[in-house]
Image: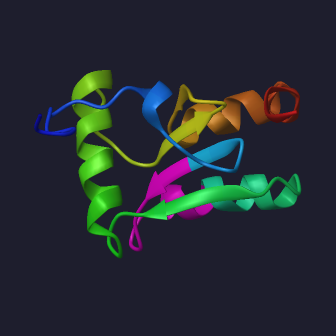
Amino acid sequence: MGGNSSNIMKPAEIKSEKTVVVYGSDNCPYCFKVKKIFEELNVQIDYRNVDENKNYDEEKQKLMTHLKYDTIPLVFIKNEFIGGCSSVKELEAKGELLKKVQ
């Protein structure tokens, strides 16, 4: 009955070929920053542009509801919610970001 119509989504439910999944949008400087950090580490990410894809936008809303988090980007590594841009920058500064994705 009724498929997945609940209004929350848990990080464990994110399906991706890639280790890193980022929900972001076109006009978000923090989203670009996060993309750039992973690019510089040569880490391929699954970048989910919520402006271009209605499903990604719905997923983003459901994840935010579940996580009680309300800004983008939403960054997940191995289906674990990492946070946004500042969390990624902090991990990178500590030298822990690359370890997490390997």
Q: Report x, y in % for residue 16.
A: 60, 48
Q: Is residue 75 left or right of residue 54?
A: right
Q: In which quarter of the image is the N terminus?
A: top left
Q: Report x, y in % for residue 38.
A: 76, 53
Q: Residue at x 66, y 44 (%)?
A: 20
Residue 71's quadrant in the figure?
top left
Q: Report x, y in % for residue 70.
A: 27, 37
Q: Is residue 26 left or right of residue 39?
A: left
Residue 26's quadrant in the figure?
bottom left
Q: In the rendered structure, does residue 30 fall within the stretch colored magenta?
A: yes
Q: Is residue 1 visible?
A: yes
Q: Residue at x 66, y 30 (%)?
A: 78
Residues rendered magenta in the picture:
22-33
Q: Is residue 94 left or right of residue 68?
A: right
Q: Quick one: 98 or 79, which is closer to the camera?
A: 79
Q: Quick one: 28 or 81, which is closer to the camera?
A: 81
Q: Is residue 68 visible?
A: no
Q: Quick one: 8 or 31, which is closer to the camera?
A: 8
